[in-house]
Amino acid sequence: MADLLLLTLLPLALLFLLLHHASPIKALLTRAKSVLAPELSAGGSFSNRPPSISPSAILSRRQYQNITSAPYGEHWRAIRHNLTSEVLHPTQLHRHASARRRALHGLVVDLAEQRKNGVVHAAESIRYAMFGLVANMCFGDDIDNNRVRAMADAQSDLVKSLSTARVFAHAKLPALTRLIYRNRWKKLAALRQQQEQTYLPLIDSRRGRHRRPSETPVYVDTLIDLKVPDDHSQDPRRHRRRLSDGELVGMCSEFLGAGTETTASALQWIMANLVKRPDIQEAVRKEINAVVGADAEEVSEVVLGKLEYLHAVIMEALRLHPPTSFAFRQVMEEDHVVHNGQRIPVGTKVYFPLAAIARDRTAWDNPDEFKPQRFLSCKDASQGTDGTIKMMPFGGGRRMCPGRGVATLHLSYFTANLVREFRWREGEGELAVDLQPHVEFFTVMKRPLRAHLELERTEIKTS
């Protein structure tokens, strides 16, 4: 009986200790029409984020940081600059054009094969295609399809675990928290171990490899060559070190997850809205056919800039369905941000409701409607005439998503070609398109996209 009583009271005692030692939480949830949004977008303020729920950072006790999780400072600047000045630099994106063509071809063949069964499971096909493309940009093209699919499934498991990792990110008593939620901790550790077993052989295969000047650079090559400030030295700016294996695994995981999940989700939202609005889908198709000849093998990247209506469709889908619903920031000492006449205290967590800002009725006409033409009448409809911020699908400021350019390219390229290759039609009953969101770490469709497809072109090449 005494043992049973102890087991009953232990959780309450642990909770009391946790609350007793926890410091007060300072948080500020901004309004839909946020007066702080310009401060976020301007870049000078809100350069720090609250502790990340990245499993890599949590499991390493914050020793392994990636671009998302690293606090603002020299280390964060070094790893972000490496990404934006190398693989994701606009002058380098064309070097992955062949990888994009292969990913598109594989996706089109897959969808064409599925359509023979009456319905296409587009959500899964889109995600695998995007993961394969991003894996190619990360590790090179020496990965076979079976390994790519296994990596994609493992990455999906990791993304699903992010919500359970939240309890460890803000724990005031980490050891106690790991004890209370030991099953969650074991699951995170197992997923991380699986990543190390998968990624480290791929990373090692690139080490010491002689690369030709004409060879397409991949992300892991830049990480292997990168030297970051050594925080353990007396002068971190002068003394630099290479990234550890643990850091390399974490940053590859970040690249794969961020590059796949957000773009795959956004592409689903775009195609779902085009299914619901066949008139808009047909308008996109007519614009493409007017620019691209019938004999062209694909809608190439060089003509995407001429497709103004396609761009408007993508921007409208990103407004209605931003990849994440909130942006999180933490006020630093050097921030001087005033809210309601008072300076926001250092350490305050500020939450920007990105989804609500993009549907603010005082900023948008009929904000819940899918109206791409709003981006035709105004070159930059994302900003008001008074400079107010009306939408931030990629966040803002120094912490804005560094993959904004490549994400827009991928969305334009895949949307254009999927509309050119197929006529997308809505199913009935459970196969109907449901535009209700499901908010996890990313904002996804509550019911994954399904559709009926008809061939627009007479033949799909399978080789």
Image (cartoon, grey):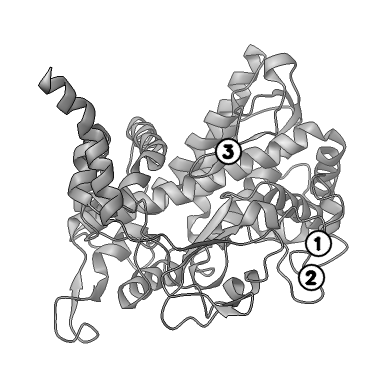
Measure how far apart labels 2 and 3 are at the Cα level. Answer: 28 Å
What's the mark number on residue 363? 1
**Position in image of residue 73 (x %, y %):** 35, 76
Say above or below: 169 vs 421.
below
Q: Amino acid at mark 1?
A: Ala
Q: Amino acid at mark 2?
A: Gly
> Looking at this rendering, what residue extends furthest in the left direction?
2
Q: Residues within 10 Å of mark 3 (few under 14, many from 20)?
A: many
Q: Nearer the viewer, residue 43 or 94?
A: 43
Measure how far apart labels 2 and 1 are at the Cα level. Answer: 8 Å
Is disc 2 in contact with disc 1, using a CB cutoff of under 8 Å? yes
Q: Secondary structure at mark 3?
A: strand
Asked whether residue 185 is in view, the answer is: no
Say above or below: 362 vs 143.
below
Measure how far apart labels 3 and 1 are at the Cα level. Answer: 25 Å
Quadrant of the rendered structure where residue 285 is?
top right
The answer to whether residue 269 is left or right of residue 97 is right
Between discs 2 and 3, the one toward the N terminus: 2
Q: Nearer the viewer, residue 109 or 279?
A: 279
Instruction: Give me the residue at 75% from left, 69% from top.
Output: 383
Identify residue for label 3. Answer: 444
Between discs 3 and 1, the one toward the N terminus: 1
The answer to whether residue 290 is left or right of residue 230 is right
**Position in image of residue 156 (x %, y %):** 41, 36
